[in-house]
Amino acid sequence: MKRQAFTLIELLVVIAIIGLLLSIIMPSLRKARELSQRTVCLSNVRQLTTGWLLYADQNEGKIVRSSVSSDPRDKNAWVKWTFPPTYENHILGIEQGAMYPYVNSTDAYHCPAAPADEVRSYNITNAMNGRLGTPPIGEFNRLAQIKNCGQRMVFICQGKIPLEMADSRHRNFMVDYPNNWRSKPGGDRGGKPRHPKGATLGFADGSAVFYRWVDPKMDTYVALEVEDWDQRYYGNQLTEINNNEDAIKFNLFVWGKFESR
């Protein structure tokens, strides 16, 4: 008997069913992928935070400098800034950093949600032995100085730091004067949140958490282009920050205080 071909209507029904199944399955697959990436990111931050504590333990309580520096005075910079800023030199900068003997896998410095050409996804907050300057920026340079370690942030999955970037604003996570966000939390320079609905953080007691935004608008804020972010959150235009619970919480995490403007 000759096999009868599918009719056009039957083909359209099959296509519609496949499309419906994909619309049901794809969000679940996307969520599973995001959860997997977040889990690995959390593990990375926990490794880095443990390495940060080990460095202090073996260096008379001194903590690494949070700046990413090419300054020869910065012998204890956690990561070195190498020129020209190529992929290979960024790898070299990690390997030359003071933290590398304690976390000696470059994979641990890279968030799985990041693009493949991104070498380092994580930064240390400016309060933790920040960059050299007059006066130096940084509240602590010894572990013993930190009180309430479980509430003082050390690491953050900040987001993409482009290979060509040599701007000091993206060398560590800066909240400059207890209420100016000079770096975007949990989002890359191109305006994409690294992990939806929050950011991965590591604390001075060795713990690591995925901090979920309290304010649902934070994903929108983090998705701003960096120029818009700077205009809105750096300097005196802080009306939204003053009323943002996440901004207040981050300032407490970094500096232990918040001063509204």
Image: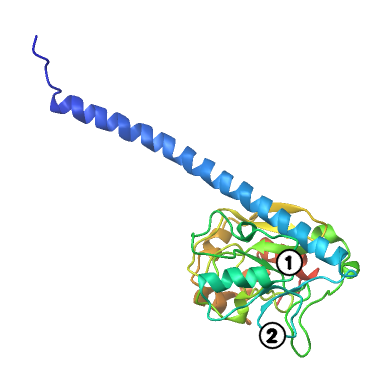
In the image, what residue occupies the spot 62% across and 61% down?
A: 106
Q: Which amino acid does label 1 sit on?
A: Met
What residue is shown with label 1? Answer: 99
Q: Where is residue 139 in the image (x, y as percent from the top left)?
A: 82, 76
Q: Looking at the image, which residue sits at the far left?
A: 2
Work out which residue is located at the far top of the displayed protein and give it.
Answer: 1
Residue 91: quarter of image: bottom right
Could you say where residue 215 lies in the image, as x and y percent from the top left? 62, 57
Q: Mark 2 points at which residue?
A: 71
As helix, strand or loop, the secondary structure at mark 2 comes to loop
What's under tag 2, amino acid-wise? Asp
Q: Nearer the viewer, residue 174 or 86?
A: 86
Residue 187, image quadrant? bottom right
**Relative to 24, is 95 above or below?**
below
Q: Which residue is drawn at 54% across and 47% down?
A: 34
Name the N-terminal-most of marks 1 and 2: 2
Judging depth in this view, the residue of 135 and 17 nearest the camera is 135
Outermost residue to the bottom: 134
Residue 173 seen anywhere in this rendered image of the structure: no
Instruction: Kindly tell me whether residue 100 is visible in this rendering.
Output: yes
**Can you give x and y, in whole percent of width and height, for residue 220 in the image?**
52, 61
Relative image position of residue 243 (x, y in whole percent): 66, 66
Instruction: Left or right? Give the position of 109 relative to 1.
Output: right
